[in-house]
Image: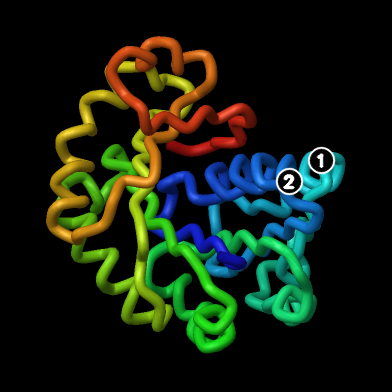
Amino acid sequence: MKHIIITGHYGSGKSNIAINLALEYAKKYKKVFLIDCDIVNPYFRSADSKELLEANGVGLIAPLYANTNLDIPALPPDIQKVFAMDCVAIWDIGGDDAGAIVLGRYADSIKKDGYEMYYVLNFYRPLTETAEEMTDLMFEIESSSKLKCTAIINNSNLGVDTDSKTVSDTFDEADIVSEKTGLPIKFTSVLTSLCSEFSDSRTDIFPINIDTRKYF
């Protein structure tokens, strides 16, 4: 596995997941890159955390004009280098099927290298509040990206108002998405401060140490 792709609905928390995964992988691998492909006028860009990532050994490949007052969809030319290097590339993809289109041009190369594509769930976002809505959107993303999702991440949250019940209330719906798609739940993301509340009941908890969420 060389490529790890993070996709899902607008505002599901893809960028926050991508950043935390990149920081975690940087502890194990010499070369880790986070590729910010969120060029569909996103709410939050991984590029906003450039200093944090680079300080922890993660190279950031961001869209041209990221962190400026221009919003011009332009993919970073440096993407090509990850296909020639021995590295782990974590892709932060724009929301829904529109954002996933950018993956299509790299699909063949990604398949050749090997990949995992994680579909991020947040049942507290409009238009993805049920398992059926989540499943339909996932199939649209797969069609646009020319790649298949391999696992699910339950990242359901209410931003700063998230507590353990906020998360646990979505376990059943996440299980339904897993059953409908035939995909395993890779993990359920939980703020580090809440992890102890799940220690006796869940084995799939992924601690979120860096919380960059601005929207829920």
Answer with the quarter of the image where residue 142 lies.
bottom left
Question: Which residue is at 63% across, 45% downward?
Answer: 19
Residue 69 visible to an observer of this rendering? no
Amino acid under disc 2: Ala
Helix or strand or loop: what does disc 1 sit on?
loop
Residue 110 sits above or below residue 216 on the image: below
Please indicate whether residue 115 sits to the left or right of residue 82 in the image: left
Identify the colour scheme used.
Answer: rainbow
Q: Where residue 39 sits: x, y (%)?
A: 59, 69
Amino acid under disc 1: Asn
Question: In front of the other: label 1 or label 2?
Answer: 2
User: Observer-nearest residue: 111 or 139?
Assistant: 111
User: Observer-nearest residue: 61 or 161?
Assistant: 61
Q: Quadrant of the N terminus?
A: bottom right
Looking at marks 1 and 2 on the same chain, the residue that comes earlier in the sequence is marked by 2
- Figure disc tally: 2
Mark 2 = which residue? 26
Helix or strand or loop: what does disc 2 sit on?
loop
Question: Which residue is at 28% across, 51% downward?
Answer: 184
Q: Where residue 122 sits: x, y (%)?
A: 33, 43
Mark 1 = which residue? 56
Q: CA–CA distance between discs 1 and 2? A: 7 Å
Question: Which residue is at 41% across, 47% downward?
Answer: 12
Q: Residues within 10 Å of mark 1 (few under 14, many from 20)?
A: few
Residue 164 sits above or below residue 39 on the image: above
